[in-house]
Amino acid sequence: MTFMITSHSPNSALYRTRSRLRLATLTAACLLLTACATVGPDYQEPPVDSGEGWSLPLANASGQANLSKWWFDLVK
């Protein structure tokens, strides 16, 4: 009786390559998912100083805005 070695046999090179690729993919997926873990319950957001120069003057609240050609302001 003769046995044929196919790609489904654990002794074939293709089977070993696919098994290694599956293991590498699973390992990479687990590492990526653990990188998304939460920081912790005691995390406090650090204060951000944006400075005084980053504020814009407010528009006149009593007048109505002209929105018919708003895009002209973008190309000036």
Image (cartoon, rainbow, N blue to C red):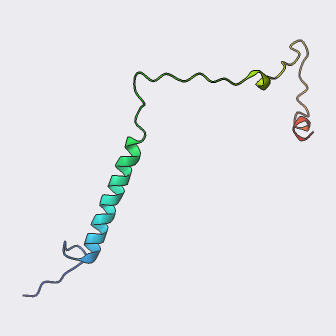
For image coordinates 91% across by 34% down, the residue present is 69
Residue at 87% across, 38% down: 74
Percent coordinates x, y for residue 10 in the rendering: 19, 71
Against 18, is 40 above or below?
above
* Residue at horizontal 19 percent and vertical 74 percent from the top: 9
Snapshot quadrant of residue 1: bottom left
Residue 56 pos. (x, y %):
81, 23
Q: Percent from the top left, x then y, of residue 4? A: 17, 83
Q: Which residue lies furthest to the left in this view?
A: 1
Q: In this view, does 52 lie to the left or right of 37?
A: right
**Quadrant position of residue 68:** top right
- Relative to 16, 53 lies left or right: right
61 relative to 56, above or below: above
Give the residue at x 26% y 71%: 15
Q: In which quarter of the image is the C terminus?
A: top right
Left or right relative to 40: residue 57: right
Give the vertical position of 31 relative to 59 (above or below). below
Q: Is residue 48 above or below residue 69?
A: above
63, 76: nearer the viewer: 76
The residue most toward the bottom is: 1
Residue 48 placement: quadrant: top right
